[in-house]
Structure formats: structure tokens, C-alpha cells
Amino acid sequence: MTLEDELRSIADAARKYLMIADEDVERVKGSERLFFERLDEIVKGALRSLLSSELAQRFIERSGLTEERAAKLFRRWLTLFVKGGYDLDHAKEVFKIGLAHARYGVYDRLVCMCAGAWLREILKAIDEGDVDDKIGLSISAAKLIFWNLIMMLQGYHVARVESLKKAGISPQLADKLFMLKAEEVYKSFKERL
């Protein structure tokens, strides 16, 4: 299976699992004005969370990311979130964002925390906006944020698999080693917690 086929399959499976219908995508696109009128406010809120995170500071310093550059990247993602087709081309763009995060060693949990900050800020904009169906738009937005998160995390997965291959470790071996010790680790932590 090619990477493109894999991305298409994951993008489609995520749409199906999250029950994303074309009307969800159109509902968010139809609210473009709401999101872009509040673009700076949404970006600042998400950026405030990022910059206040001790976990994020490590990666910000390592990558040389400035606040201005982060704001620009956040604006780009929000534009993709609103205007994206939630198709293969969109999946490729979001996948590359995940690869870029993996390249700098950003923890996947930080990406999940950022998705939560995005959700918070987007829901706040919907709540404060002049929207007829706030609940419907909120549900659609949440589905689409999680679709983006899944595609970003796929970037992490592929980066790990390819890194293992380059180090001479097959992904199957890595999975087997993990599973061999996962039960032991589970029992150990279960007893301690």
C-alpha cells in the first residue's frame, strides 16, 4: 500500500468513525466569515495556551519557533480547518504538519492539548457569534478538529515507523517487543496506582 493509499484509507475511516458528513464540512465552510472575523482572537487564545505550557517551551526553544511564526502557522491551520475539503489533499497537508512536529520531537500529547485549545477557542467563537444553529456548528467543528488531530498523529506514526526501519528495526519487531512488556508494565502500574 502506498503512503497516499494509506492516507486516503485513514482519512476515510476517520470520516466514517466520526460520522463526518459532507454537510458538516459545508456547515463549517459556510461559517467562514464567523471564524475569519475572529481569526486573531481564536489564534491568540490557542497561542496563549501553547506559550504558557512548560512542556511546549522545550520544543519552542529547540525549534527556534517565535511567537510571530507560531501565530502565522496557527492562522494557516485555522484556514485549512475552515476551507479544507477533508479529502486526500487535505489529509496530506495535515499529515505534513504532524511530520513537522515529529521532526522537532514535539510530544503527541502536546498536539492533543493544542487540539483541545483549538476546540475551546472555536467553540467560544461559535458561542459568541451570530449563528443560527450553534449546537450543530459546534458538533461539526468538533468532528473536524478530531479528524485533523487523527491525520496529524498519523504523521507521528509514519515518522516512528520509518525511523525504526532506518535504524534496522522492523515495525513488526517493535510492536512485538512492546506487546511483550506492555502486560507487565500494565500490572506494575495498576498495583502502584
Image (cartoon, rainbow, N blue to C red):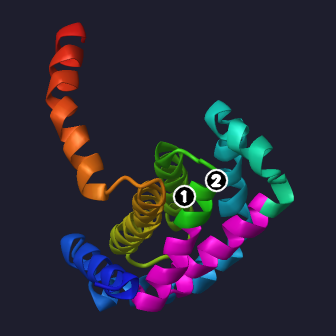
Amino acid, disc 2:
Ala
Evaluate whether residue 130 shows in this view: no
Q: Earlier in the sequence, mark 2 or mark 1?
A: 2
Give the residue displayed 62% in from the left and 57% down from the top.
103
Kindly indicate whether the residue at mark 1 contacts the one at mark 2 (C-beta within 8 angstroms): yes
Q: Would you place residue 82 above or below residue 112 in this image?
A: below
Label 2, secondary structure: give it.
Answer: helix
Q: Which mark is residue 130?
A: none
Reply above or below: 25 against 111: below
Q: Which residues are magenta?
A: 70-97
Q: Position of residue 71 (x, y in %)?
A: 76, 62
Locate residue 36: give its quadrant.
bottom right
The image quadrant of residue 178 is: top left
Question: Circle 2 sits on which residue?
Answer: 46
Along the line of sight, which residue is nearer the eye, 175 or 183? 175
The residue lying at 36 percent from left, 74 percent from top is: 140
- Residue 91 is situated, as x and y percent measured from the top left of the image, at 44, 81
Q: Quadrant of residue 168?
A: bottom left
The residue that mark 1 highlights is: 118
Expressed as whole percent of the image width and height from the top left, the position of residue 35 reads: 60, 75
